[in-house]
Amino acid sequence: MGAAGTVTVPRLRIPATRGLSGVLAAGLIALAVVVCLAQWLAVTSGRPGPGPAAVLGHVVAALAAVGLHVAAERVRGRFGVLASWSVVVLAAAVLWFGWWA
C-alpha cells in the first residue's frame, strides 16, 4: 500500500533478468568450449567435426553474450534490460541454428 490508501504496482525485477543473462552467457561459453574440443578431437583423429563455421559461430556468440552481460550489469534502466534480453535472444538463436535446426 502506498500513501493514503493508494496501491503501488510492483516493478519488474531487473536483477532476475540479469541473473538469467549471466547463466545463459556461461552456458554459451560452455557450448563454445565443447564445440572447440569436438573440432580438435575430430582433426586429431582424422574424422569430420563440426567445422570451422560452427566453431567460429559459437565463439563469437559466447564473446558477444559475455559483452552484453557485462553491459547489463553495469548499465541500469532500459538499456540494461535490453542488454539482458539480447543475451536471451542470442542464446536462443545459437541453440536454434547451431543445435536444433
Image (tube, rainbow, N blue to C red):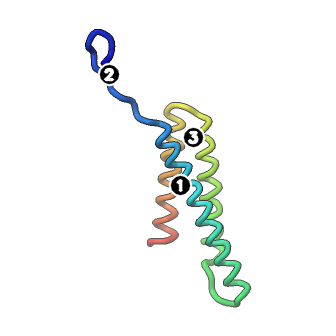
Residue drawn at x 57%, y 40% as measured from the top left: 72
Q: Secondary structure at mark 1?
A: helix
Residue under pointer 3: 72
Rendered residue at 59%/56% (across/down): 26
- Residue that label 1 marks: 24
Q: In which quadrant will I find the C terminus?
A: bottom left
* Depth check, front residue: 30 or 100: 30
Q: Secondary structure at mark 3?
A: helix
Q: Is residue 81 above or below residue 37?
A: above
**Type of residue at label 3?**
Ala
Q: Badge 1: few (under 14), some or many (20 or more) residues near its Cα, within 10 Å?
A: many
**Quadrant assignment, res 57:** bottom right
The residue lying toward the viewer, choosing from 4 and 32, is 4
Residue lying farthest left? Answer: 5
- Disc 1 residue type? Leu
Q: Which mark is residue 49?
A: none
Q: Earlier in the sequence, mark 1 or mark 3?
A: 1
Question: Which percent across, then down, holds residue 75?
Answer: 59, 34
**Image x and y of residue 20, in percent:** 49, 48
- Are discs 2 and 1 less than 8 Å apart at CB? no
Q: Position of residue 34 (x, y in %)?
A: 62, 71
Q: CA distance from mark 2 to mark 1?
A: 32 Å
Give whichever of 7, 64 is nearer the camera.
7
Q: Is residue 53 left or right of residue 97?
A: right
Which residue does the numbered mark 2 point to in the structure image? 8
Q: Are marks 3 and 2 in contact (CB under 8 Å)?
A: no
State the separation of the CA atoms marked 3 and 2.
26 Å
Q: Nearer the viewer, mark 3 or mark 2?
A: 2
Dot placed on the residue nearer the N-terminal end, 3 or 2: 2
- 3D distance between C-alphas at marks 1 and 3: 13 Å
Q: Residue at x 53, y 50 (%)?
A: 87
Query: Looking at the picture, which amino acid does disc 2 mark?
Result: Thr
